[in-house]
Amino acid sequence: MKILKPVKALIAIVAILSATLANAAQTYAVMPDGEITFDVSTTGITRVSFTNDRIRRVVHGETDFEMTNDEATGDVFLRFVGIDPHNETGYFVTERGITIGYTLLPKEEAVPPILITINGLEDQTVPQNNGGDFGASVGFSDSVATAMADIVRSVAAEYVLGREVPSGRDGRRIKSKKGDGWIADVRIAVAGEDGRLVREQDYYKPGVLAIWIAQSQLGPNERTWFIVVRGN
């Protein structure tokens, strides 16, 4: 889980990159609670921007991308820091309290910025002090992100790492651990005969603070661990 940090000199780098891409952009129109799929660069920096809203936070599981937010514009900048690129999923949560699911498709080349328009917002105003579906305590706070990472790391070390995945139905709860203001459920994800991609949005619902998936891509009839941390 990477922590979102304030933009500093990164803005100048992105400006240069944007200039080399001329006026090209990956443009999307999506309804609230919709989903989009877009290319993201593994060799440079990719900008994600909403044309009629601002990104307040990004919710995701384990990721190979460092994500940096510009507090002035609400844009998010992604930089690949992993080794083996693979598709990733997560959610953008906006200042209006709208959630948009996303899938990142890594490309070994520079890609245009992503410009997203949310349909049906012309008559809406951005609410003040809006906590969104996941609670006001979760945002671009380094301390909150660090706390979630520490919780997942601790629960995984206690119940997951080095253990064989048991049998059972998809989503079966194996263990629960309660802390100060949170509960972590250790569950299993199960693939069918064709395999599956285990996505965070498959298990998200209001009140969920973090999700960690041990193995996102499953082969036929394979199983994996995942951890859901929710508010208490």
Image (cartoon, grey):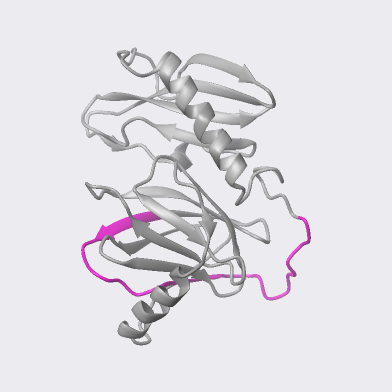
Question: Horizontal and vertical percent for residue 50?
Answer: 54, 70
Quadrant in the picture for the C terminus? top right
**Residue ranking furthest to the right:** 128
Taking depth in this image into account, of 189 and 86 the one nearest to the observer is 86
For residue 207, which quarter of the picture? top right
Q: Residue at x 26, y 48 (%)?
A: 86
Q: Is residue 169 above or below residue 14?
A: above
Q: Is residue 81 magenta?
A: no
Quadrant in the picture for the N terminus? top left
For residue 197, which quarter of the picture? top left
Span highlighted in magenta in the image = 103-129
Q: Is residue 182 above or below residue 141?
A: above
Taking depth in this image into account, of 59 and 193 the one nearest to the observer is 59
For residue 47, which quarter of the picture? bottom left
Q: Main secondary structure of the magenta part?
A: loop
Q: Residue at x 46, y 70 (%)?
A: 9
